[in-house]
């Protein structure tokens, strides 16, 4: 097997956490993270600040898990939303999480913010979050890794459940004019998982998910795997 090497991403996402951005805006935090109009305003400001060619949403990696019931601390102008009290203690809890309702809540506001920006002529990028990051926003990290080592089949079932929710998210994003999907899993990097677990995750989940993801985009969209 070829060696798996770590890639150090040089792009620093300052969305929602840069005082240089938030101090110049007449927005109230953390309320600004919850509504489509303020999300769009913040995304445009970050684009200008970073000299980017696109607007990136959302401003955290908790939107998907919140839509499944996670307890979220919405933060402030300097610290974006993050998981607070973990709601799962077992694999059964994870498998029993509800499917995401994309018609309501903050995830709907994110999608509508994407629509607003697209209608204004912006190129819109939506970040979706992979299963390792999602699981560790729902369950204590040590328990997640123990579960993966002792019961990989059940853990894979959880990953696939979360992955199906992401594909539905992409379907909704496509309808809202999103042009770029960026898939990130900051809790599932080589530095955290190690070479063996990283290779196993790629074989068991990521490679197959990437192929499915390509089936859910149209000719006007691109996918970036982070």
Image (cartoon, helix red, strand yellow):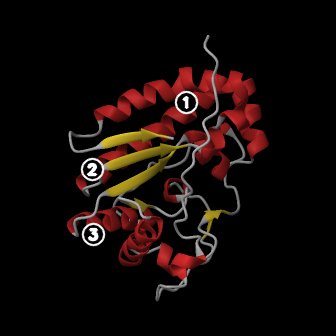
The label shown at residue 174 is: 2
Task: Indicate the quadrant where residue 157 lies.
Answer: top right
Q: Is residue 78 visible?
A: yes
Residue closer to the observer: 9 or 80? 9
Tell me the element at label 3. helix
Q: In the image, is residue 51 above or below residue 39? A: above
Task: Indicate the quadrant where residue 81 lies.
Answer: bottom right
Rendered location of residue 2, percent (x, y): 61, 14
Q: Give the spatial CA distance, label 3 vs label 1.
A: 35 Å
Rendered location of residue 163, percent (x, y): 47, 38
Lower sequence index among marks 3 and 1: 3
Lower sequence index among marks 3 and 2: 3
- Read off the residue under disc 3: 116
Q: In the image, is residue 111 above or below residue 208? A: below
Q: In the image, is residue 174 above or below residue 46? A: above
The label shown at residue 157 is: 1
Tell me the element at label 1. helix
- The residue positioned 41% from the left and 70% from the top of the image is 48
Left or right? Give the position of 70 relative to 171: right
């Amino acid at each position: 097997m070829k060696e798996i090497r770590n890639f150090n991403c040089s792009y620093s996402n300052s969305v929602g956490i840069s005082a240089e951005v938030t101090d110049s805006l007449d927005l109230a935090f953390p309320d600004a993270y919850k509504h489509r109009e303020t999300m769009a305003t913040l995304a445009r400001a970050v684009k200008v600040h970073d000299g980017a060619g696109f607007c990136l949403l959302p401003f955290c990696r908790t939107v998907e898990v919140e839509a499944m019931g996670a307890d979220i601390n919405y933060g402030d102008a300097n610290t974006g939303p993050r998981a607070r009290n973990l709601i799962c203690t077992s694999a059964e809890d994870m498998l029993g999480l509800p499917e995401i309702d994309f018609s309501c809540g903050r995830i709907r506001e994110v999608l509508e913010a994407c629509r607003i920006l697209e209608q204004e002529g912006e190129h819109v990028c939506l970040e979706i979050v992979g299963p390792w990051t999602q699981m560790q926003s729902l369950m204590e990290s040590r328990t997640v890794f123990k579960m993966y080592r002792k019961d990989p089949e059940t853990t894979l079932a959880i990953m696939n459940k979360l992955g199906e929710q992401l594909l539905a998210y992409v379907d909704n994003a496509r309808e809202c004019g999103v042009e770029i999907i960026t898939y990130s899993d900051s809790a599932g990097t080589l530095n955290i998982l190690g070479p063996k677990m990283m290779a196993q995750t790629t074989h068991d989940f990521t490679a197959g998910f990437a192929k499915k993801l390509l089936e859910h985009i149209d000719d006007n969209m691109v996918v970036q795997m982070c």
